[in-house]
Amino acid sequence: MTKTNMVPVPSLGIIPERDVNRMPILDIHHLGIDFGGLHAVEDFNLVIGRTEIAGLIGPNGAGKTTVFNLLTNVYTPSRGVILLDGVDIRGKKTWQLNEMGIARTFQNIRLFNKLTVEDNVKVGLHNICRYSTLEGVLRLPRYWKMEKEAHEKAMELLSIFDMQHMANYVAGSLPYGAQRRLEIVRALATNPKLLLLDEPAAGMNPSETAELMQNIRKIRDDFQIAIMLIEHDMNLVMGICEGIAVLNYGKIIAKGTPDQIKADPVVIEAYLGRQGEESLHAEG
Amino acid sequence: MTKYKNLSSPTKNMVSTFALVIGLFLILQILLLTGSVSSLVKGQLVPICAYIVMAVSLNLTVGILGELSLGHAGFMSVGAFSGVVMSSVLKQAGASDGLRLFVSILTGCVFGAIVGFLIGIPVLRLKGDYLAIVTLAFGEIIKSIMNNLYIGLDASGLHVNMLKDNLNMTDGRVIISGPMGVSGNDKLSTFFAGFLLILFCLFVIFNFVDSRAGRAVAAQRDNYIATESVGINVTKYKLTAFTISAGMAGMAGTLFALNYSTVVASKFDFNTSILVLVFVVLGGLGNMKGSILAAIVLTLLPELLRAFSTYRMLLYAIVLILIMLITNNPEMKHVVDTVLSRIKGLFRRRKGGAVND
């Protein structure tokens, strides 16, 4: 893998060199949310470049998934500003945020279990292949045209993970790894600018993880989108992420390139405890 | 892994449901022509059609949308009374019976859908049991309003009021007279119209389910948050499905009301909502064929049990329980499956024999 040069930008973040002259896809300032008296996420600042693969890591309960839920307005932030492609997303609903370009997967897989694999992807294509409900009920020409297009697009997207032959299977009956991949395909179907992956490699074996790494990179290259991922598998995070943020107790304790993060004593202490230095090197 | 095709493909399901309805209609037509249908059953043909439409429309809400609605008779009531008023207006205008029935059913659909839409806005924000309770309440509210509604028609047009004395009629006729309901209604509904209405509703439902909107509805039933996360305005599609369902209930109401000379609001009460829900649950959630068959059997059953006079409803309940037990019993299902596959095997052998010859 060729190493990306990460450069500092004015708002205290770092982004890949190739993205410097373009508006960052995500620019988060002082983001925070309280649950009762608990500051689940506090003073969260992050910049992500247009085609960056960013990692968000941290011990269990650090607030990583909460950050994703704030970005998709599953939770409404208590404080802070999120700029998506330069636009403030305050007050937008989850489905509007998807239309604006944020797509995500879930830590505990959320597929449409009773629908077929193809229909799962077609639900993702909802806003891409459009026709009105009336056109659908009356089977007007636009329905046939758009449904044909949706079928072709769904098959094309499934082919990223070589899943075309599974199109007619019921999603809930797929093996775990395939379900995770299908969730990524469904998110990609919405034509996002920023893809949020919540533990994409959870439950996968090492060879599946290696394949997933290649696929994530391929998705970034083919679709030219930014990808932000939460992951506990250090091989994956250190292998493909260009910028990494480490979260602990709701606060960012370190930001940097994989090499910087690996060497950061604060991270090692927070992540693995004081004696954990060796194991991080072993894993990474 | 289960292949969806092996379970049932949507198209196959749609074709077989239409075949079932058309087949039953043709058989009944032949029986009617040969005069072998008792007057008891003959009188139930239109109500059965209305109940089938009710059952398939409620199946859209309960089976496909996945929300338990206990106020479906309310929409039927709205459709019934708006349809009756329209038919009276058209009578004054001198329209033909067929046109009156058609426009009345359309009116029932529009009013049912409007009320469904308005009720759907607050109701669909709720989930599960709470939604069921609130639909129950709205069903009762509609019944109470209809029970106190007076509508009269004279030369100057329609008069609507909640008090009889305030109608301000000079001459003309009171169409809806509060708790006394409608009397002297023209019986416009025909079995054929009911049959066409069923076909229309099935057409709409199957096409809706197998479209972009239908997928959105099915997706939110499986996983609400994931559906929103792929950019679907879930509330919009829930409301669409609920409105369609209410509009169909309105059409069923008009068909039902125009089959009788007197109609009262108390007919469309909680019991009717539950009765239709029983059709849906017995027939299977999301299973249109099941809803149709359940509506037919359970509408005819009380009539066929009339011979037992006092014990009629007791026997009805027992038969209902037995059907539920038998259809949900895996061993019974196995027996039925074995018999069916043997019958299929017989046919196959015969076909094979023909080829060998």
Image (cartoon, rainbow, N blue to C red):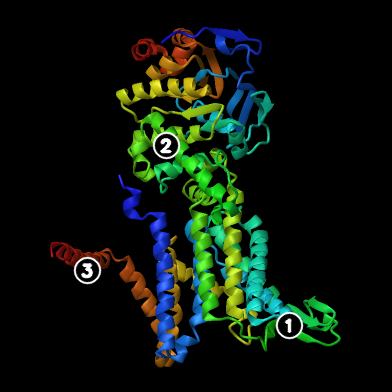
Q: Are marks 1 and 2 in contact (CB under 8 Å)?
A: no
Task: Please state the total of marks drawn on the protein image.
Answer: 3
Name which residue type carries label 2.
Met
Q: Residue B94 carries which label?
A: 1
Q: Where is residue B87 in the image (x, y as percent from the top left)?
A: 69, 79
Q: Quadrant of the N terminus of chain B?
A: top left
Seen in the picture, residue B13 relative to B306 is either above or below; the reply is above
Q: Name the residue located 66 percent from the left edge and 10 percent from the top edge.
A: A10
Name the secondary structure under disc 3. helix
| Chain assignment, label 1 | B
Question: Which subunit holds the residue at mark 2?
Answer: A
Q: B101 left or right of B55?
A: right
Query: Where does the image place residue A188, in percent across and percent down from the top left?
Result: 49, 32
Query: Residue B188 or A45: which is nearer the viewer?
Result: B188
Label 2 to label 3, Cα distance in Å?
A: 39 Å
Residue B124: give x, y in percent of width and height: 60, 55
Q: Which label lies toward us, 1 or 3?
A: 1
Disc 3 designates what residue?
B343
Q: For the residue labelled by badge 2, is the local secondary structure a helix, a strand or a loop?
A: helix
User: In which quarter of the view is residue B353 placed?
Assistant: bottom left
Q: Are the residues flagged by discs 2 and 3 in contact, CB closer than 8 Å?
A: no
- The amino acid type found where label 3 is placed reads Ile
Q: In which quarter of the image is residue B156?
A: bottom right
Question: Which residue sits furthest front?
Answer: B357
The amino acid marked with disc number 1 is Gly
Taking the image as shown, residue A209 lies to the left or right of residue B300, namely left
What residue is shown with label 2? A155
Image location of residue A166, percent across then percent down: 35, 40
